[in-house]
Image: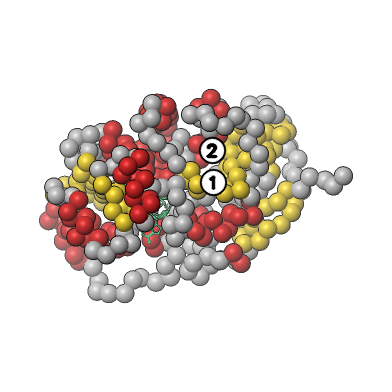
């Protein structure tokens, strides 16, 4: 009988612009042995997230660059197969950051924690009940500070973060307008998630359509994408509008600044005249709000106030292709790779 393998996806080279599958390499390694204070877990679900594009650059950012020749970093949910760690037992489900591999080793540090299947499908720990959900919740509530009756706009509105931003905006009594790529996503956002409107950014005249959808202007713009969507939003921002700057996925593959006139003076003028509050944030800036997030979001998901969609692809070998697609809007919902069998019964939550 052959020894069990431990397939891994390594970062082979750094992309120039859009990544290609050639930037990655799939290799087989051995399953690690847990040293004292460590456990080994079998990966069940791997999270794909836009920030992974930044990991592929050799540039200082808010994330450490991935190392060439090593597995791509990333969040995963797995099941402990062997443990020399006092807090983790064989069979426990865990969230960890061992990256793109079938078996990972952990000492329980960092973001590692147990996942209770009673809280919902295991993969939710990578989405609505994990980092992306926490991003939406903390960014909107701390920096967006939405008041009842105000207008909230968010793009990538069918995705992991944007879908939650809009639904929390509705819970807080706001008018919520989403922006998404394509008619199918827009229909889902408006009809199933209950946004007041959703506009397709691929159709012509986004500025005109956004103006019509926001007759009272925009009080909170949750920035996920940048690019032409931001250009459409800026003139509609009301006095004292808040702009949590969460992500700029439209420009992650860019290798140079966009052509055209320098618009920084216009932006600065708008910030001054309208007293706009732009604030960048990283989810873990609000790490101390984790318990509050889990209590609120867990309840909203259980009560059906926050709906959540996943886009699951089987097979670790498909992670590179799927990450490339995620950066272009090919995903429809939170992108998850199912790496191995999920032993929990389906259909909870
Ligand atoms: P999504 O599930 O929303 O997937 C990314 C989506 O971005 C695509 O589906 C696509 O949606 C949209 N998109 C891609 N290119 C463009 C473009 N050129 N113009 C407009 N939209 C585009 O990803 P997440 O929900 O995980 O992440 C959303 C944002 O939040 C990202 O910018 C990410 O980096 C950021 N983020 C920030 C964190 C922080 O701590 N600050 C933490 C987590 C996420 P569509 O087809 O609808 O256009």
What is the x, y in percent for residue 170? Answer: 27, 36
Q: Residue 132, relative to residue 349: is it above or below?
A: below
Q: Which quarter of the figure has residue 28?
A: bottom right
Please state the horizontal and vertical placement of residue 334, each as a whole percent of the image.
47, 46
Rounded to the nearest angstrom, the CA distance separating label 2 from label 1 is: 10 Å
Residue at the spot 85% in from the left edge and 47% down from the top edge: 2
Residue at numbered disc 2: 123
Q: Mark 2, residues whose alpha carbon is within 10 Å: few (<14), some, or many (≥20)? A: many
**140 is higher (above) or lower (below) than 156:** above
Do the numbered discs 2 and 1 sit on residues whose CB atoms are within 8 Å? yes
When asked about the image quadrant of residue 168, the answer is top left
The location of residue 307, given as percent across then percent down, is: 40, 36
Residue 83 located left or right of residue 2: left
Which type of secondary structure does the marked residue at label 2 adopt?
Answer: helix
Task: Establish whether ligand 1 lies closer than 8 Å to the Cβ of label 1.
Answer: no
Mark 1 neighbour class, 10 Å CA radius: few under 14, some 14 to 19, many 20 or more: some
The answer to whether residue 127 is seen in the rendering is yes
Q: In this rendering, would 295 be left or right of 123?
A: left
- Judging by the rendered image, the residue that carries numbered circle 1 is 312
Q: Does the beta carbon at disc 2 come under 8 Å from ligand 1? A: no
First-in-chain label (2 vs 1): 2
In front: label 2 or label 1: 1
Q: Nearer the viewer, residue 127 or 198?
A: 198
Q: Is residue 114 visible?
A: no
- Tell me how the rendering is colored: secondary structure
- Residue at the location (61% across, 67% down)? 22
* Residue found at x 45% / y 65%: 253
Q: Quadrant of residue 169?
A: top left
Residue 46 vs residue 262, the one in the foreground:
46
Q: Does residue 47 sit above or below 293 in this rendering?
A: below
């Amino acid at each position: 009988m052959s020894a069990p393998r431990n397939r891994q996806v390594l970062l082979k080279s750094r992309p120039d612009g859009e990544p290609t599958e050639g930037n990655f390499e799939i290799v087989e390694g051995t399953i690690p042995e847990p040293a004292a204070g460590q456990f080994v877990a079998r990966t069940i679900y791997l999270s794909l997230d836009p920030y992974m594009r930044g990991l592929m650059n050799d540039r200082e950012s808010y994330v450490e660059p991935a190392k060439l020749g090593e597995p791509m970093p990333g969040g995963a949910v797995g099941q402990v197969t062997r443990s020399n760690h006092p807090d983790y037992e064989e069979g426990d489900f865990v969230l960890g950051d061992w990256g793109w591999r079938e078996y990972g080793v952990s000492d329980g540090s960092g973001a590692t924690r147990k996942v209770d299947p009673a809280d919902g499908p295991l993969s939710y720990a990578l989405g609505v009940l994990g980092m992306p959900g926490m991003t939406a919740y903390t960014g909107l509530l701390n920096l967006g500070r939405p008041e009842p009756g105000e207008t909230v706009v968010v793009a990538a509105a069918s995705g992991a973060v944007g879908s939650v931003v809009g639904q929390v905006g509705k819970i807080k009594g706001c008018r919520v307008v989403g922006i998404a790529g394509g008619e199918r996503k827009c229909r889902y956002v408006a009809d199933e998630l209950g946004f007041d409107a959703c506009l397709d950014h691929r159709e012509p005249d986004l500025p005109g359509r956004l103006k019509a959808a926001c007759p009272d202007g925009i009080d909170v713009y949750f920035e996920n994408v940048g690019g032409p969507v931001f250009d459409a939003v800026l003139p509609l921002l009301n006095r004292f509008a808040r702009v949590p700057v969460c992500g700029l996925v439209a420009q992650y593959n860019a290798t140079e600044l966009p052509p055209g006139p320098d618009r920084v003076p216009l932006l600065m003028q708008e910030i001054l005249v309208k007293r706009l509050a732009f604030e960048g944030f990283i989810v873990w800036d609000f790490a101390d709000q984790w318990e509050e997030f889990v209590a609120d979001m867990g309840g909203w998901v259980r009560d059906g106030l926050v709906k959540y969609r996943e886009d699951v692809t089987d097979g670790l070998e498909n992670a590179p292709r799927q990450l490339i697609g995620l950066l272009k809007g090919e995903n429809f919902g939170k992108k998850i790779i199912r790496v191995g069998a999920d032993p929990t019964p389906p259909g909870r939550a």
